[in-house]
């Protein structure tokens, strides 16, 4: 089950050969392919240092999925790593769909974790996701993913997932298996599938609460997340998102520290469609505030306070949006204060 990609029917190479197709060949439907790009201009100011200006290629992804049999599908997705300038595998999954209540995934994918990890950078609500010391702080092999196997099921408005994942691949420094589990309850509209969104731009009325936990050799990481979204004014929507995290020697943003944190995010999508030349979309305002404490580490304890403000122009939801952002991160010690201002563009097909 891949995410929002455009189906493309592939031509079989055998059509160029004058031979009958094998009786073993089956037409099981289309292979699905897609791609996504996030790019930005960022001005960064750091306390005690000169400011910098950069044009960045934040992410570039290619998605593939398709059926193997009626009950088995595959998913293979890649992402550009801006640090190493290389392409890495984010998802490589064999998916066994027995029923909506019984699904097995095996390979590399997102383990049961918080909503923020499940929506990733392309389906997050704000631009500067994963900068607050809270969201998606679970250990991973690459881009929040790990190698393993998991069960998940949708029970009407309750979603459950549990699995085991490779500790050595997840950069934990230990080889023991990581156990992971998540439970989510949707009180209003239902969210189908395994991966989630940070917003639905008013397509759903949501009131969802989820809890996740991972454990490895006595060390734990746990989160509770909340999302409320309501349609208003014939095309508008407001959202409230929040999360509490407790990374107890497993995961976290800074190695060697325990950390706890909480954030709150609020947004409003204006209902009026605004046309600019050949572009049309809706404006959205968003604000976020987060606090994270880092304790019992190799040096002194400290805290981080993060503020983010977005002005977004949403043209085609997650397929086309332009996001003007301001991000301010303040520390009482250990790390310097930083702030960023810029504009980000996201396009997917």
Image: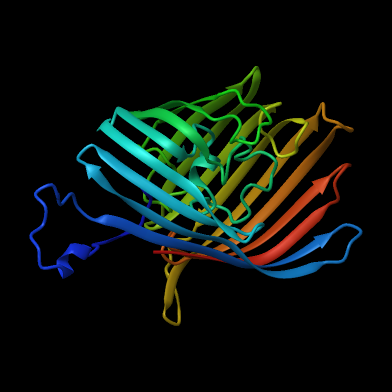
The residue at the far top in this view is 218
Task: State the residue at coordinates (11%, 52%).
Answer: 22
The residue at the far right in this view is 48
Q: Quadrant of the N terminus?
A: top left
Relative placement, left or right, of 205 versus 249 is left
Relative placement, left or right, of 302 versus 106 is right
Task: State the residue at coordinates (37%, 47%).
Answer: 75
Location of residue 107 by image quarter: top left
Choose between 324 and 5: the one closer to the eye: 5
Colour setup of the view: rainbow
Q: Residue 255: where, in percent of width, then height? A: 75, 35
Relative placement, left or right, of 23 versus 311 is left
Above or below, 186 relative to 145: above
Q: Quadrant of the C terminus?
A: bottom left
Q: Residue 28: where, in percent of width, then height? A: 18, 49
Residue 156 seen in render: no
Above or below, 68 relative to 323: above
Location of residue 58 by image quarter: bottom right
Q: Residue 117: where, in percent of width, then height? A: 54, 41
Relative placement, left or right, of 71 versus 314 is left
Choose between 43 and 67: the one closer to the eye: 67
Choose between 256 and 295: the one closer to the eye: 256
Residue 202 seen in render: yes
Q: Residue 36: where, in percent of width, then height? A: 46, 61
Task: State the residue at coordinates (40%, 55%).
Answer: 63
Count of marks, rendered view: 0
Location of residue 178 by image quarter: top right
Task: State the residue at coordinates (73%, 39%).
Answer: 291
């Amino acid at each position: 089950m891949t995410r929002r990609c455009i189906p493309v029917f592939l031509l079989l190479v055998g059509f160029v050969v004058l031979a009958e197709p094998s009786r073993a060949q089956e037409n099981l439907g289309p292979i699905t392919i897609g791609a996504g790009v996030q790019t930005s201009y960022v001005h960064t100011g750091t306390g005690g240092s000169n400011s910098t200006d950069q044009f960045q290629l934040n992410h570039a992804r290619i998605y593939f999925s398709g059926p193997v049999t009626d009950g088995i599908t595959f998913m293979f997705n890649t992402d550009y790593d801006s640090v190493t300038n290389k392409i890495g595998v984010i998802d490589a999954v064999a998916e066994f769909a027995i029923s909506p209540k019984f699904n097995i995934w095996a390979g590399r994918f997102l383990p049961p974790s918080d909503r923020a990890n499940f929506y990733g950078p392309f389906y997050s609500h704000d631009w500067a996701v994963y900068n607050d010391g809270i969201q998606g702080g679970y250990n991973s092999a690459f881009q929040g993913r790990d190698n393993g196997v998991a069960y998940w099921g949708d029970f009407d408005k309750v979603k459950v997932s549990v699995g085991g994942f490779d500790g050595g691949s997840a950069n934990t420094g230990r080889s023991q298996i990581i156990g992971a589990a998540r439970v989510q309850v949707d009180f209003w509209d239902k969210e189908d599938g395994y991966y989630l969104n940070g917003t639905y731009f008013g397509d759903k009325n949501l009131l969802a609460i989820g809890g996740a936990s991972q454990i490895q050799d006595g060390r734990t990481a746990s989160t509770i997340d909340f999302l409320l979204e309501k349609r208003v004014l014939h095309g508008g929507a407001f959202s409230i998102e929040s999360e509490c995290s407790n990374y107890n020697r497993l995961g976290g943003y800074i190695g060697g520290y325990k950390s706890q944190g909480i954030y709150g995010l609020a947004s409003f999508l204006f209902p009026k469609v605004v046309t600019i030349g050949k572009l049309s979309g809706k404006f959205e305002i968003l604000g976020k505030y987060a606090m994270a404490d880092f304790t019992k580490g190799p040096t002194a304890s400290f805290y981080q306070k993060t503020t983010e403000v977005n002005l977004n122009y949403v043209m085609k939801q997650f397929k086309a949006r332009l996001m003007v952002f301001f991000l301010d991160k303040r520390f009482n010690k250990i790390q310097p204060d930083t702030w960023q201002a810029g504009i980000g563009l996201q396009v997917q097909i």
